[in-house]
Image: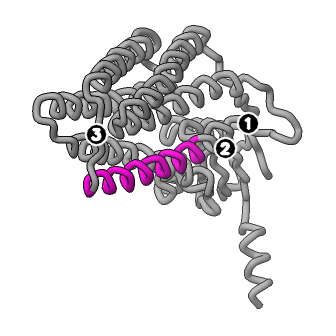
Amino acid sequence: MIHDRPHSYLTTGSAEAERRIFQALLLTGGFMLTEFVGGVLSGSLALIADAGHMFGDFIALMLAWAALRIGEKTPDLRRSFGYHRFQVLAAFVNGIALLGIATWITLTALARLIEPEEVLARPMLVIATLGLIVNVVVLRILTGGEHANLNIRGAALHVIGDLLGSVAAIGASVIIIFTGWMQADPMLSILAAALIVRAGHAIVKQSGHILLEGTPEEVDPAQVGKQLMSRIPEVLDVHHVHIWSLTDERPVLTLHARVAESVEHDRIMNEIHDELQSLFGVSHATVQLEYGPCPDNIKAHQHRN
């Protein structure tokens, strides 16, 4: 017998969280364009690299805002799990884009190390300093309210990384002003590119794992059956355990559980769901109760013979 508790995939959209993320989104996007134009006009690759990292922040903030908005849409017959996967797919594309930006920055920086180009260090310093101030303001906006909101916390981590990019651009401009050593700009650009690669790789790895229906890192499939059988004596065997995620915050699970014939169906079902929630954080589980040999195993055996 298959049983699936009714679940809602809707998240209660926080108006305060949406407001904060949208404010940060506008500030980041606006200054990202300013920094890119300033980098082109001043000839500073470090500024362009920092703008590339800020582009990653902009996408992360946009995804966080979109996740709050789109996550409120009601699931329908064609999308019974709702629209949560939108943020995962967009994050994967964002990660690939960041890796592409970092590759371009690195190749350009290596070329400039061989043949240095003149950089207008003073305008570069002004723009990089403004970028640092904008990042500090954005960080205060994101961390000044609902600290428990995972979307805000994730976006704040991106902004912290961008602060380092702004510091690198400031350092390069100061070195050029006082020493005239133009290679400081491409060298610190490579450092900024490394930060972008780290962020992009983490995003691609995590979102790709979710898109491939990988098992969430915080859940050990081998422990699911052991824990259920040890905590619920009427559960005799657990098999065909499949665990995946809608997003990094929403694990989903299906399993077969063989139970004693005398067990009360509703009681044992509620106990299994409660244990899955408390032990593994799984709020959506589809459980098939069996009172004898698993039909799927019998069919598989017959097929092999």
* Position of residue 218 measured from the top left corner of the image (x, y, whole percent): 45, 46
- Towards the viewer: 277 or 136: 136
Q: Amino acid at mark 3?
A: Glu
Tell me if residue 180 is in the magenta stretch: no
Q: Are marks 2 and 3 in contact (CB under 8 Å)?
A: no
Q: Is residue 215 above or below residue 174?
A: below
Locate the C terminus and report the quarter of the image it occupies: bottom right
Residue identifier under label 2: 285
Q: Residue at x 33, y 37 (%)?
A: 46
Which is nearer the N-term, disc 2 or disc 3? 3
Q: Secondary structure at mark 1?
A: loop
For residue 5, the mark is: 1
Number of numbered tags placed on the structure image: 3
Determine the CA span between mark 2 and mark 1.
7 Å
Q: Residues within 10 Å of mark 2 (few under 14, many from 20)?
A: many
| Horizontal side of residue 237 vs 79, given as left or right | left
- Towards the viewer: 59 or 79: 59
Magenta stretch, residue numbers = 91-114
Q: Residue at x 63, y 28 (%)?
A: 67
Q: Amino acid at mark 2?
A: Ala
Question: Residue lying furthest left in this view?
Answer: 179
